[in-house]
Amino acid sequence: MIQSDALSRWPGYNQTEEEEKITMLPENTFGHDLDPDYLIEDNYGYSNDGDIIQISVIDTELQQKIKKGLEEDQIAQQVIKGLTEKELTPLKQELAGWKYNDELLSFKNRTYIPANLELKQELLKLYHDLPSQGHPGIFGTMANIQRYFWWPGMHTFVKSYVQGCALCQQMKVNTHPSAPPLAPIKADPYAYPFSTVTMDFITDLPESNGYNALYVVVDHDLTNAIILIPCTKTIDAIGTARLYHDNVY
């Protein structure tokens, strides 16, 4: 059964025999899968057949720091020992996914980072702090860094680092804003009138007799009586104290 598409039914469209042929580009035109078993890189990220395969994400200085850190990492040394032993030992059988090549240790095709705090912080600066990275947050930083590197507890380390970034916390949107709890002032049942007061200003009122605001004083503990004192919105602390002394005190 042959089912025609819409184009073949279009009037005036006559598909020729040449148009039915599909030209396929040779396989070596496309990049190979980034499989470390296949990649044979030199310093410029080229394979032996001349195709550009992958640009190394680890510069020379960082490589040296990782190699030095491996020498001081007990876990790494045990893994390297198990991988380099010629005999098939139980430890070697448990190291599936680990590889040791060019003095670098990798786990599931990702470079292993030794237990070195400064080295981990340097990686986070590269994949989080730089302007080109744009402070991508916890998940964005994890997505960037776990493509190439791995170490035990990496997610916890990245989460702690990002949460401690002042710029990230400033830019973070609070999706659950919390209102501060109310703390009412307890009333004294034995208080005298206006012994405890609250005060505020009502401003930008229509001007009357040169005044455009009200100084409001409320008796808090006993009567809830209100004293309204006319004033201006530009009144200062000294003027407020004078109004309180003359009208309330």
Image (tube, rainbow, N blue to C red):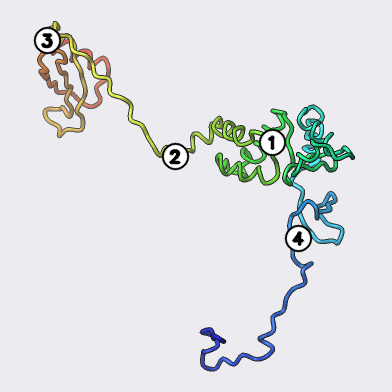
Q: Earlier in the sequence, mark 1 or mark 4?
A: 4
- Tell me which residue sits at (57%, 44%) in the image: 140
Q: CA distance from mark 1 to mark 2?
A: 30 Å
Image quarter of residue 70: top right
Q: Nearer the viewer, mark 1 or mark 3?
A: 1
Q: Position of residue 211 (x, y in %)?
A: 16, 27
| Residue marked by disc 2 | 173
* Label annotation for residue 32: 4
Question: Image height check: is 230 above or below 162?
Answer: above
Q: CA distance from mark 1 to mark 3?
A: 70 Å
Viewer-side residue, 240 vs 69: 69
What type is the residue that disc 2 sits on? Val
Instruction: Report the side of 123 relative to 102 (left or right).
Output: left
Q: Earlier in the sequence, mark 1 or mark 3?
A: 1
Q: CA distance from mark 4 to mark 3?
A: 88 Å
Per the image, label 2 sits on a secondary structure element best described as: loop
- Tell me which residue sits at (74%, 32%) in the image: 114
Discs 4, 3 touching: Cβ within 8 Å: no
Q: Nearer the viewer, mark 2 or mark 3?
A: 2
- Tell me which residue sits at (76%, 54%) in the image: 35
Dot 4: within a 10 Å radius of its alpha carbon, few (fewer than 14), some, or many (20 or more) residues? some
- For the N terminus, give its image quadrant: bottom right
| Residue marked by disc 1 | 151
